[in-house]
Image (cartoon, rainbow, N blue to C red):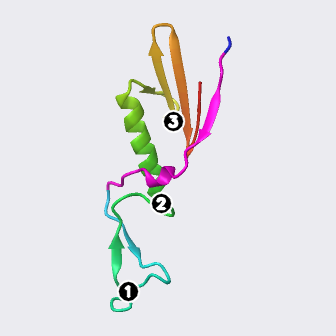
Amino acid sequence: MGFTVYQMDVKSAFLCGTIDEEVYVMQPPRFQDLAFPAKLYKVEKAMYGLHQAPRAWYGTLSKYLLKNGFQKGTIDQTLFIKKQREDFILVQVYMDDIIFG
């Protein structure tokens, strides 16, 4: 069949997602505002350590792939398929790792 498969790791993937809910975090140690020690910060974008970060990254990547002609697999929602005439490309996503061919 001659099908070549490539793999990649997306660096800083979890920093690329956008979150759709309000999330607040405590001030990190050594970066506290001593005048307001109980102050919280509202998170505007996904960041490492948030439970929402992997889902936010997947949502951003999924929207991009769907906008560019890919279709989600019916059984595996992390498999994306794009067909053009007799050619096709498969993209499998797992967290910040991607295999495609």
Marking on residue 51: 2
- Disc 3 residue type (three-letter): Thr
In this rendering, the label closer to the viewer, 1 or 2: 1
Residue 9 colored in magenta in the image: yes
Disc 1 versus disc 2: distance between alpha carbons? 25 Å
- In the rendered image, residue 81, in percent from the top left (x then y), is placed at 49, 23
Q: Quadrant of the N terminus?
A: top right
Mark 1: secondary structure: loop
Q: Judge whether residue 95 can be spotted in this image.
A: no
- What is the distance, in whole Å, between disc 3 and disc 2 at their CAs? 18 Å
Q: Is residue 82 magenta?
A: no
The relative height of residue 66 versus residue 10 in the rendered view (above or below) is above
Residue 87 image position (x, y, % from top left): 52, 12
Near mark 3 (Cα within 10 A), the count class, few <14, some 14-19 or many ≥20, is: some
Q: Quadrant of residue 26?
A: bottom left
Q: Main secondary structure of the magenta part?
A: loop
Outermost right residue: 2
98 lies left or right of 61: right
Q: Nearer the viewer, mark 1 or mark 3?
A: 1
Q: Nearer the viewer, residue 36 or 21?
A: 36
Mark 1, residue position = 33
Q: Disc number at residue 78?
A: 3
Highlighted range, magenta = 3-20
Question: Between disc 1 and disc 2, whose residue precedes?
Answer: 1
Mark 1: amino acid: Asp
Residue 3, percent from left and from top:
65, 17
Query: Mark 3 or 2 closer to N-term?
Result: 2
